[in-house]
Image: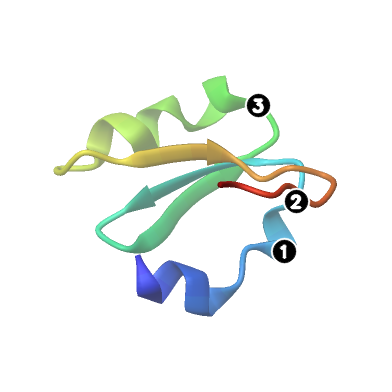
Amino acid sequence: MKNVLAQGLEKYVGEWVVICKDHVIAHNRDLRKIKKDIDECKSRPLITKIPKSETLIF
């Protein structure tokens, strides 16, 4: 996950992001539009929405 965090995710604010093997492989505001990319990931992808405002995760 270090590669993804090093890239910075601020350019994806408000979008769904698909991370596969430590790389962003797709992003879009509409999750349905990136379903094909999710299905093509050979490992278990991480799918998350980048919030519009700061979020503190404990």
Tell me the CA gap for discs 3 and 2.
13 Å
Nearer-the-camera pick, 50 or 38? 50
Q: Position of residue 46 (x, y in %)?
A: 37, 42
Q: Residue visible at 80% across and 52% down?
A: 54
**Going by the image, does 24 lie left or right of 28?**
left
Q: Position of residue 57 (x, y in %)?
A: 60, 47
Which badge, 3 or 1, comes first in the chain's sequence?
Answer: 1
**Going by the image, does 54 lie left or right of 50?**
right
Tell me the CA gap for discs 1 and 2.
5 Å
Amino acid type, mark 1: Glu
Amino acid type, mark 2: Val
7 above or below 16?
below
Residue at label 3?
30
Amino acid type, mark 3: Asp
Residue at label 1?
10
- Label 2 Cα neighbours within 10 Å, binned few <14 / some 14-19 / many ≥20: some
Circles 1 and 2, Cβ within 8 Å, touching? The answer is: yes
- Label 3 Cα neighbours within 10 Å, binned few <14 / some 14-19 / many ≥20: few
Circles 3 and 1, Cβ within 8 Å, touching? The answer is: no
- The residue furthest left is 42
Which badge, 3 or 2, comes first in the chain's sequence?
Answer: 2
- The residue furthest bottom is 6
Q: Residue visible at 73% across and 47% down?
A: 55
Q: Which mark is residue 53?
A: none
- The residue furthest front is 58
Residue at label 2?
13
Which quarter of the figure has residue 3?
bottom left
Q: Residue visible at 24% across and 58% down?
A: 21
Which quarter of the figure has residue 18?
top left
Q: How many marks?
A: 3
